[in-house]
Structures are given as structure tokens and as C-alpha cells.
Amino acid sequence: MPSRSEEKVVTPALLGDWPLPDAQGDKESRGTVLVIGGARRTPGAVLLAGVAALRAGAGRLQLAVAEESAVALSIAVPEALVIGHSGAAEPDEVLELAREADVILLGPGLDDIDRTIELMRAVLRETEAGVVLDAYALGALSKEPDVLRQRRAVLTPNIKEAAIMLGREPGSDLAGAARELAERYRAVVSLYGHVADPDGGAWREESGYTGLGTSGSGDVRSGIVAGLLARGAEPAQAACWAAYVHAMSGRRLAPRFGQVGFLARELVDEVASTIATV
């Protein structure tokens, strides 16, 4: 397992030598992100993730949420195509969008593990798109570890989700935990500032603020990853850039709000300008 000393520190210089794909061109050239999540009580998670994906440069956004929330979300995010999902079987419209998407972000706002497993199975067998798994989708992956099938994938667990995926508490060695998860699931893992890929690469982002530990912050981070993947970034590159942009967006807010007190929706508003300053 990599130690902290073996991780590369994510800095503007490192990112400058690892530039994102050219963002020029029309919206199709910058990719389509489909965010699937949003249970009846938590549609805001999909909103945060989806808008963050657009701010990170994705060209098109599609959202699939609980049927009850679809109309309200379509008004809140007029830039997106919004559809509802419900019941045991996936409506054809969700599967059609999955087939056409460049990146699928699954998990924000879901709250039923069995339902999430059904969603993951149904959607991923329909597409070879890049995938970002977050929240309940990570618990689903722990029960269906082979479902990713060697695709471009990034996993964005918090500490609790990492414990579920590992089958134990990760402890203080988060670099080692990220590497273990990357090897186990054959995907890039971004865990609390530590990024690992299954081929042994390891990075550490050191700019995070305490205030990033706020409701909805993880949805923003996963959305940034999805948006960068849609632009054509490789999984480890997208994860490292997203970790830095997420953390620095918090730093940009701190002079106005202090280290704690800023909101996840305010992080979203800093994403595009933070990327532009790297």
C-alpha cells in the first residue's frame, strides 16, 4: 500500500503538466452527463451534482430522479433534460438516455440499497459509458463488485462508505485504504483527498477546508468528476483535478464565510472559475 510519502501532492504545477482536454467546440464535443439518483426526499443531491458537472465543462446534462421530483427539478435546472424513475423496472426512457450518455453518475440522493442495485444492474448493462459511483451506489457496488466490467470508472466514497466497501473501518491510513479499494474494484478511488488508481498511481490533495464537510459537498465533488470525464479526462486525471477544484472552491469561499458556514450550492458557483485559474 502507498504511504503518504509515496503519494504525489496535487498542486497547480502538477495539474498544469496534466492539462484537461481542450474545452473548445460545441456541447456534443464536451460530452453528455446523465445523473441518476434523487429519491423522493433528496432531489437536491442530483441538482448539486448535475450543475457541478456543467460548471466543470460538460456539454449536456440529463437528470433522472424520483417521479415526484421531476417537474420541480426541471424548473430548478432549466439547462437539463429531466425525467422520472420509479418502480422495480426501469422505464425505457432512462435506459435510452443511459445508452446515449458519455458519463453516468449514479447514486446522489438514493436511499434504498435494493433499489440502487436494480438501477445499477439495469443501467450499466446497457452502456459502456464512463461511470462515477457515489453514495448508495457504492454500497450497491460492494454487493455487486464485478458490475463495472473494466470500464472508465471513478468511485467517490466518504469514510463511512469506504468502511462498507472495505468491510472494516479504514482507520488513519486513508492512502492505503484508497489503494486497497482501487485494487479491489479495479477503478480509480477518490477518498477524502487521497486518489488511487488500480495500476498503482497515488496522489494527495492538501488544500481542503473543514467547511467542505457540509451537506451536499460530496455531491458537488462527484459532479465535478463526472463533468471532467465527459470532457475527455482520464479517470485518475478527473479525480485529481476534481479533488483540487473542490478543495480550492472552499478556500475561495472562506474569506466570506470562514472555514465553516459556506454551502454546497456556493461551492458549485466557484467550480468554473477555479478550473480557469489553474
Image (cartoon, rainbow, N blue to C red):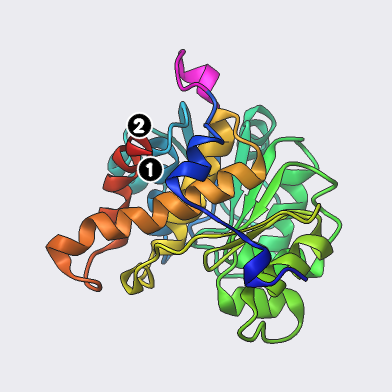
On the question of residue 124 being in view, the answer is: yes
Residue 172 sits in which quadrant? bottom right
Q: Is residue 39 left or right of residue 7?
A: left
Three-letter residue code for mark 2: Glu
Foreground of the two, 219 or 182: 182
- The answer, for residue 69, to whether it is visible in the render is no
- Disc 1 designates what residue? 51
Task: Tell me which segment is drawn in magenta.
Answer: 22-32
Identify the residue shown where x is 75% and y is 45%: 124
Residue drawn at the location 32% of the way across and 53% of the way down: 249
Q: Quadrant of residue 119?
A: bottom right
Q: Residue at x 57, y 50 (%)?
A: 239
User: 82 or 132, which is in the foreground?
Assistant: 132
Which image quadrant: the C terminus? top left
Q: Nearer the viewer, residue 135 or 100?
A: 135
Q: Position of residue 210 (x, y in %)?
A: 34, 74
Mark 1: few/some/many CA within 10 Å (<14, 14-19, 20+): many
Q: Are marks 2 and 1 in contact (CB under 8 Å)?
A: yes
Report whether 42 appears left or right of 226: left
